[in-house]
Amino acid sequence: MDARELLRSQFRFAHQFLEMALDDVSPETAATRVGGATINSIAHIYAHAVTSEDAFVSGAKG
């Protein structure tokens, strides 16, 4: 296993873990942003994580 394969494997595991963590979160809950909060909604954070993951994995394709 080279470094690229290792990174892909780790990203695959992390993505599966993220999906498992959000399995029971409804779309309404994911889209909710608590009043006065300084953090984005779960959906916004999820989109950012998946987009970043995709960019990194695409860059590692070589």
Image: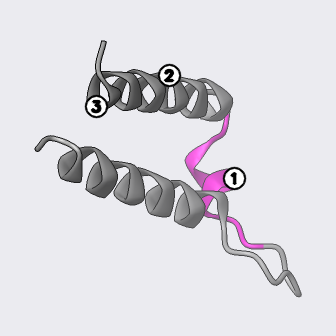
| Kind of residue sitting beneath label 3 | Arg
Near mark 3 (Cα within 10 A), the count class, few <14, some 14-19 or many ≥20, is few
In the rendered structure, the answer to whether residue 39 lies left or right of residue 52 reads right
The image's mark for residue 4 is: 3
Q: State yes or no: residue 11 in magenta.
A: no
The residue that disc 2 covers is 13
Which residue is found at the position 73% from the left and 72% from the top? 33
Q: How many labels does the image show?
A: 3
What are the residue bounds of the magenta stretch?
A: 25-33
C-alpha distance separating marks 1 and 2: 24 Å
Where 14 falls versus 9 (above or below)?
below
Near mark 1 (Cα within 10 A), the count class, few <14, some 14-19 or many ≥20, is few
Where 56 falls versus 11 (above or below)?
below
The residue that disc 1 covers is 29
SS class of the residue under badge 1?
helix
Pick whichever of labels 1 and 3 is earlier in the sequence.
Answer: 3
C-alpha distance separating marks 3 and 2: 14 Å
Which residue is found at the position 38% from the left and 23% from the top? 6
Pick whichever of labels 1 and 2 is earlier in the sequence.
Answer: 2
